[in-house]
Image: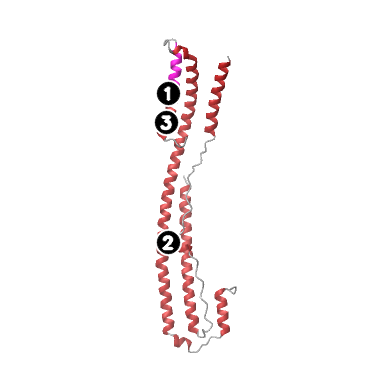
């Protein structure tokens, strides 16, 4: 049922109702129309069944159409959300690119200053191998 | 008489089938949002901190090393903040799609 287009469903249900109604009316007019008289009972039964089934599916059709509208609405919302998510990703990539560059420039500037002041910094301080080992332990977290 | 019974049974069967199959129809909307893709820079493996070379014996070596490592920390901090931004944005977008 979900594979059928909306218009087909409307036609199918309305067609069932119309055929049902026509059959019932014809069955009551069977006395006037000689040819139909033979099928009077069959027409009545078929007409009633079609009317009942048609009425039932008329209600079902409204539910189905509402359901399809909800699917369409959901698909639109998701498409918008995915587009916004993609847009946000582009902004995030741009922010990372720009700010990483700032961080690297800062680091380079500081390294340059250290290089400039190297003699002054190293004048009175010598680092022992034990201190280096401890320092590296701190860098690596002591586990590597 | 037998013919009417068969017809009656047929009508009941058709009506029953219609009611049962329509009753089984799902009302859950079968549309879901795909899990969003995170930006590539956020998925990269973080850089390890640099250690001091064994032959380093001056304070400037430590300062150089610390500066480089602080830079790496700041880059990670930046990525962490962007992870939070990505998560909050996508959480909000997902929530928006679920609301009527």
Vertical comparison of A23 with A14: above or below: above
Q: Quadrant of residue A93?
A: bottom left
Identify the secondary structure beneath mark 2. helix
Vertical comparison of A37 with B54: above or below: above
Between circles 3 and 2, the one closer to the viewer is 3
Question: What residue sits right under mark 2 in the picture?
Answer: A92
Please name the residue shown 41% across and 68% down the image. Answer: A99
Q: Quadrant of residue A26?
A: top left
Q: Earlier in the sequence, mark 2 or mark 1?
A: 1
- The x and y percentages for residue A71 are 45, 42
Please name the residue shown 47% across and 14% down the image. Answer: A40
Whether the magenta-drawn stretch holds residue A19 is answered as: yes
Q: Earlier in the sequence, mark 3 or mark 2?
A: 3
Tell me whether marks 1 and 3 sit on the same chain: yes
Q: Give the CA separation, mark 3 to mark 2.
A: 48 Å
Pick whichever, A139 or B92, lies toward us: A139
Q: Earlier in the sequence, mark 1 or mark 3?
A: 3
Question: What residue sits right under mark 1 in the picture?
Answer: A18
Vertical comparison of A58 with A26: above or below: below
């Amino acid at each position: 049922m979900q594979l059928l287009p909306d218009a087909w469903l409307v036609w199918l249900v309305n067609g069932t109702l119309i055929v049902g109604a026509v059959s019932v009316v014809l069955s009551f007019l069977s006395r006037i129309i000689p040819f139909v008289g033979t099928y009077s009972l069959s027409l009545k039964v078929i007409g009633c069944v079609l009317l009942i089934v048609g009425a039932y599916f008329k209600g079902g059709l409204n539910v189905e159409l509402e359901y399809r509208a909800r699917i369409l609405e959901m698909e639109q919302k998701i498409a918008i959300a995915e587009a916004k998510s993609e847009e946000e990703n582009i902004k995030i990539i741009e922010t990372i690119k720009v700010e990483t560059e700032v961080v690297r420039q800062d680091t380079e500037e500081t390294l340059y200053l250290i290089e400039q002041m190297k003699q002054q910094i190293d004048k009175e301080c010598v680092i022992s191998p034990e201190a280096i080992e401890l320092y590296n332990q701190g860098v690596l977290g002591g586990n590597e | 008489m037998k013919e009417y019974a068969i017809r009656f049974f047929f009508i009941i069967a058709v009506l029953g089938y219609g009611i049962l199959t329509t009753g089984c129809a799902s009302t859950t909307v079968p549309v879901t949002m795909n899990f969003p893709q995170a930006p590539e820079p956020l998925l990269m493996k973080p850089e390890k901190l640099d250690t001091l070379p064994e032959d380093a014996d001056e304070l400037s070596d430590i300062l150089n090393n610390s500066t480089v490592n602080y830079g790496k920390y700041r880059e990670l901090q930046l990525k962490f903040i962007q992870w939070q931004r990505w998560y909050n944005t996508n959480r909000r977008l997902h929530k928006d799609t679920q609301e009527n």
